[in-house]
């Protein structure tokens, strides 16, 4: 797993984050499915993605993760991408949600 970024978002915002897997994949291999997991960095508990973001999209060699009005806190978002050739690659980013 690789932490690919650290982001800050306010709880009233709806933002998207692109996870680009192209550096790990041959040009003719595409992502066919993905899973998104959210973990609270405060206590290590899993946070249901359905309450945090509710949607993501697979786009060739990218996964777009939507964060829709998340609750205040610190999170690790993990994306596991599976490709048409059978590869599986996992990347993560961290997010701090705070009201400034």
Image (cartoon, rainbow, N blue to C red):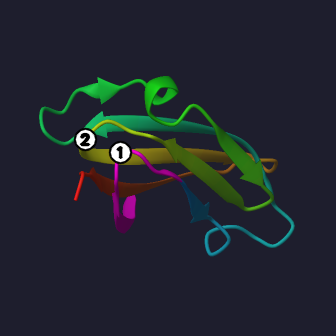
In the depicted structure, whether residue 56 falls above or below residue 62: above
Point 45% across, 25% down: residue: 51
Task: Give the numbered dot on residue 11.
Answer: 1
Point 18% across, 33% down: residue: 44
| Left-right relation of 12 to 55 | left
Point 12% across, 32% down: residue: 43
In the depicted structure, whether residue 45 falls above or below residue 72: above
Q: Quadrant of the N terminus?
A: bottom left
| Left-right relation of 54 to 51 | right
| Left-right relation of 68 to 32 | left
Relative image position of residue 40 (x, y in whole percent): 24, 36
The residue nearer to you, when weighing 50 against 35, is 50
Q: Which tag, 2 or 1, sits closer to the chain's start?
A: 1
Judged from the image, the secondary structure of the residue bearing numbered disc 1 is loop
Point 40% across, 46% down: residue: 77
How far separated are the C-alphas under marks 2 and 1?
6 Å
Relative image position of residue 34 (x, y in whole percent): 64, 40
| Left-right relation of 37 to 19 | left
Secondary structure mainly formed by the magenta segment: strand
The 10 Å Cα crowd at callout 2, few under 14, some 14 to 19, many 20 or more, is some
In this picture, which residue range is highlighted in magenta? 1-14
Check if residue 84 falls in the magenta segment: no
Relative image position of residue 76 (x, y in whole percent): 32, 47
Q: Hey, which residue is sitting farthest left in the picture?
A: 43
The residue nearer to you, when weighing 36 against 24, is 36
Residue under pointer 2: 72
Relative image position of residue 83 (x, y in whole percent): 74, 49
Judged from the image, the secondary structure of the residue bearing numbered disc 2 is loop
Task: Give the numbered dot on residue 53.
Answer: none
């Amino acid at each position: 797993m690789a932490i690919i970024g650290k982001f800050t978002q306010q709880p009233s915002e709806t933002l998207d984050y692109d996870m680009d897997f192209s550096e790990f994949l041959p040009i003719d291999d595409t992502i066919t499915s993905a899973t998104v997991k959210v973990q609270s960095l405060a206590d290590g508990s899993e946070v249901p993605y359905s309450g945090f973001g509710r949607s993501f999209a697979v786009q060739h060699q990218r996964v777009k993760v939507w964060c829709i009005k998340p609750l205040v806190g610190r999170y690790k978002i993990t994306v596991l991408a599976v490709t048409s050739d059978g590869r599986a690659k996992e990347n993560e980013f961290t997010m701090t949600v705070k009201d400034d």
